[in-house]
Amino acid sequence: MASSQEEEDDYMSMAIPEPSSTLSRSETSVRRVARQKREAEARAHQPSKAEIAHQAETKRDEALNTSLPSTSKGFQMMAKLGFKAGSALGRQGNEHARTEPLGVVVKEGRAGVGLEGEKKRKFREGVGVQEGVEEGNKRRETEGEFRERQGREREDKRLEGMCWGAMKVLEGFESRQDGGDVNGQDHGDGKVEAEKKTTAKPTKQINVLWRGLVRDRQEKEWERRMRYDLHQSLSRNAAYDDPDEDEQDRQAWGREEEEVEEEDGELEEFKQLEPAERLRSMVEYLRNKWRYCFWCKYQHPDEEMEGCPGLTEDEHG
């Protein structure tokens, strides 16, 4: 009866017992979830290249700074040969013998072992040349120089086109002797006859002023015939003899050897001249022989060439 009364008193008392140490040390569900999350993140973390390199370097330094343990197989083999910890290898009494192993120098990059030394040697020998190269690299084309160069290139291209036009006029005048007009055309079959006589003449006998035009036309014709030959070679029997074939057709089919033009040194030398100089030579030739002004586009009746402002383009405005 007394025990039941005590239980009722304990039940009715307002005293709150202190929490036990086991409960204080227990992990709540929130903390457990946070801890598991941190552990999962640590396991899932992929180290970067820099971290991997740092870890490898740390492990290497630790291994190099650690002496060879006596339990090592290598240490035991050296001990049998008379090696003692702290002493040097080799003959006894050598004052200059090493007691520590050589240091390790890690080589970075993919260059050869002796490349750095070779670079230093070349740098010492060619320091003057290197300074000159650096000085050259410092120089840059200014905006004004760039515009000037672009202007020269455009002018050369324009003059080159005029040279081709002057060559055509010269060829037309020369073919005029065979019955054509200034442009090398004729009323009827004159153009065909003039072209045949011009192309039949050996190239080196043509005036060098317009020889390049004839040479260019011959090269284009040769390429055209070669393409035609390539296109027809698979569909034509080589033994077939066509009575309508002319000389050029036989050359295209390989039945007749074509005379190969030798290198023309005079023409190449003429092409090396500046476009303005070549054009001036053509204009002077037209004026002196044919009384024709390339800028006026007119053939004068006499050598005085009355009404022509002058020889150059600038004089014609």
Image: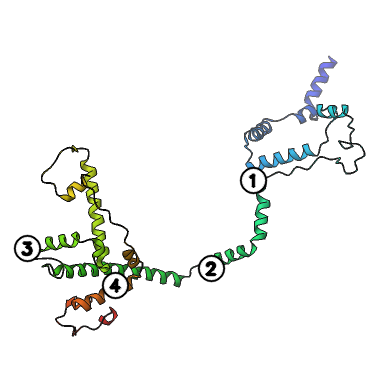
First along the sequence among labels 4 and 1: 1
Q: Residue at x 6, y 63 (%)?
A: 188
Residue tagged by mark 3? 188
Residue 5 at x, y = what percent?
82, 19
Q: Is residue 236 left or right of residue 121?
A: left
Camera-side mark, 1 or 3:
3
Residue tagged by mark 1? 112
Q: Residue at x 64, y 62 (%)?
A: 127
Q: Crowdedness of circle 4 by 10 Å Cα count: few (<14), some, many (20+)?
A: many
Q: Is residue 138 left or right of residue 279?
A: right
Camera-side mark, 2 or 1:
1
| Quadrant in the picture for the N terminus | top right
In terms of image quadrants, where is residue 253?
top left
- Residue furthest toward the right? 93
| Quadrant in the picture for the C terminus | bottom left
Residue tagged by mark 2? 139
Amino acid type assigned to the residue bearing label 3 in the image: Gly
Residue tagged by mark 4? 279
